[in-house]
């Protein structure tokens, strides 16, 4: 009977301290709440970048595959250039366009030397063509790298921003202890709770950003290899067919 009464008394007792995550956030100090808002905003932007980049690289891969199919099946560079508008999403098509246009400039300039026994001019000025292609390569790589710096920044600073909120929350707990001269759970729990939440949100913000950044850097390296391979093939074809001494 005694144990039943004691159990009933315990069951009717309400917890003094509310340890819910939402309650901890709402009751946190302004500084900690501002820290959490910054982290949440960084996380949302990071996820938006990750989703956008994932779609971009998927589209880019398909577009490059389609352009390479055209490039190797076409009978002339003019045929490729005439159909290049259908492959605007391909980074390789942009490199080809830059190279083709520079090739036309060389052919129309004094660098063309018309031989009597040939049907097309043999050109010089290969360095100009190589520079045009290299510049186009760099532009395409920069497009792929766009916005990734935000992921890198979020991944490296997120834990430290969360740590700032943690330190601030613990400082609040110590101040309450000093003000009340009590170190009970009811006094220190709110500050410690908001501190731990700041740490957790900092990690939740940083980890996906870091994983996404590393994933897309790996994708860019693969695309860079494909770009370099295409540029080499294109230059070899042009040298063999249009330039003197090759």
Image (spheres, rainbow, N blue to C red):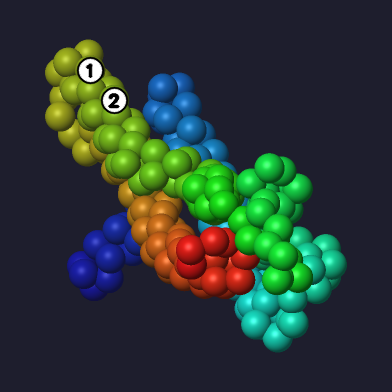
Residue closest to the eye, 117 or 123: 117
Residue at mark 2: 168
Q: Measured from the top left, where is residue 207 in percent x and y?
A: 36, 54
Dot 1: element = helix
In the rendered view, would you say 181 is above or below 109? above
The image quarter in which residue 99 lies: bottom right
In the rendered view, would you say 232 is above or below 62? above
Q: Measured from the top left, where is residue 87 in percent x and y?
A: 76, 67
Residue closest to the eye, 215 or 130: 130
- Badge number at residue 175: 1
Residue closest to the eye, 108 or 5: 108
Q: Does residue 27 appear in the picture of this structure? A: no
* Residue furthest to the top: 179
The quarter of the rendered structure image containing the N terminus is bottom left
Q: Residue at x 27, y 70 (%)?
A: 4
The image quarter in which residue 56 lies: bottom right
> Is disc 2 in contact with disc 1, using a CB cutoff of under 8 Å?
no
* 180 with respect to 104 (left or right): left
Q: Residue at x 70, y 86 (%)?
A: 73
Q: Measured from the top left, where is residue 18 in percent x and y?
A: 39, 44
* 153 with respect to 5 (left or right): right
| Mark sitting earlier along the chain (2/1) | 2
- Badge number at residue 213: none
Disc 2 from disc 1: Cα separation: 11 Å
* Badge 1: residue crowd in 10 Å (few <14, some 14–19, many ≥20): some
């Amino acid at each position: 009977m005694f144990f039943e009464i004691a159990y009933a008394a315990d069951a009717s007792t309400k917890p003094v301290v509310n340890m819910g995550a939402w309650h901890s956030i709402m009751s946190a100090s302004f500084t900690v709440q501002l820290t959490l808002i910054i982290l949440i905003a960084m996380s949302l932007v990071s996820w938006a970048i990750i989703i956008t980049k994932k779609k971009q690289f998927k589209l880019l891969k398909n577009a490059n595959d389609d352009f390479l199919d055209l490039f190797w099946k076409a009978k002339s560079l003019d045929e490729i250039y005439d159909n290049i508008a259908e492959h605007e999403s391909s980074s390789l098509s942009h490199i080809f366009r830059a190279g083709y246009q520079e090739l036309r400039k060389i052919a129309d300039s004094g660098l063309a030397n018309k031989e009597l026994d040939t049907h097309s001019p043999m050109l010089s000025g290969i360095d100009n063509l190589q520079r045009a292609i290299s510049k186009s390569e760099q532009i395409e790589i920069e497009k792929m790298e766009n916005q990734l710096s935000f992921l890198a920044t979020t991944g490296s600073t997120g834990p430290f921003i969360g740590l700032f909120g943690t330190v601030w929350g613990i400082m609040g707990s110590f101040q309450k202890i000093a003000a009340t001269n009590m170190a009970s759970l009811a006094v220190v729990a709110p500050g410690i709770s908001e501190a731990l939440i700041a740490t957790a949100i900092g990690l939740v913000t940083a980890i996906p950003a870091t994983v996404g950044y590393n994933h897309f850097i790996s994708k860019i390296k693969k695309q860079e290899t494909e770009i370099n391979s295409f540029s080499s093939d294109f230059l070899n074809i042009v040298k063999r067919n249009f330039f003197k001494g090759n």
